[in-house]
Amino acid sequence: MATDVCDGCGRAVSVAGGIANLWTFGENDGSDGSAITLELADGTEHLLCYPCLEVIPDDPTAEDVARLEQVDPETSRLAPVGERSEESL
């Protein structure tokens, strides 16, 4: 399983699939990553962890992704419009 960084909060994530999981089936089929890539209506793509996916609004924009912050290892939040804390950058 490949690893990367969440575009929203910056936490390390695992990405399901890829060549490492090409011939695996059942329990180890490669479908259990901790992030997915979303293609937004504006044409941008963002790799987001599940805590960020839980708080991002329906029909998100790239600005919503830029406002995502990590609160702790299991939760994320949206910063107020136009703000993002220094510790989340």
Image (cartoon, grey):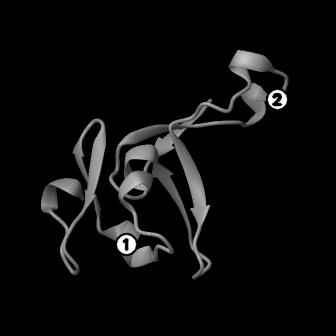
Distance of label 2 from label 1 (alpha carbons) = 33 Å
Identify which residue is drawn at 47% across, 53% down: 48
- Which element type, helix, strand or loop, lies under badge 1? helix
Outermost residue, left side? 86
Q: For the residue marked with disc 2, what is the amino acid?
A: Leu
The reply, left or right, for residue 12 in relation to residue 68 is: right
Image quadrant in which the C terminus is located: bottom left
User: x, y percentage for residue 13?
Assistant: 46, 38
As drawn, 29 above or below 51: above
Toward which corner of the image does residue 8 lie, by quadrant? bottom left
Residue at 62%, 29% in the rendered image:
1
The crowd level at tag 1 (other Cα within 10 Å; few <14, some 14-19, many 20+) is some
Q: Which residue is mark 2?
A: 22
Place of residue 2 in the rendered image (x, y in percent of width and height, measured from the top left):
60, 35
Pointer 2: residues within 10 angstroms few (<14), some, or many (20+)?
few
Residue furthest front in the image: 58
Q: Which residue sits furthest right?
A: 23
Q: Is residue 13 above or below residue 78?
A: above
Q: Name the residue nearer the viewer: 58 or 6.
A: 58
| First-in-chain label (2 vs 1) | 2
Q: What secondary structure is found at the residue carrying circle 2?
A: loop
- Is 35 on the left or on the right of 64, as rendered? right
Identify the amino acid type marked 1: Asp
Compared with 64, 24 (above or below) is above
Q: Nearer the viewer, mark 2 or mark 1?
A: 1
- For the point 46% across and 77% down, which residue is it? 61
Above or below — where is 80 with respect to 14? Answer: below
Give how far across and how far down residue 65 sits, in percent: 39, 67
Q: Are marks 2 and 1 in contact (CB under 8 Å)?
A: no
* Residue in view at x 57 percent, y 49 percent: 36
Residue 64's disc is: 1
Q: Which of the labelled discs sits on residue 47, or is there none?
A: none
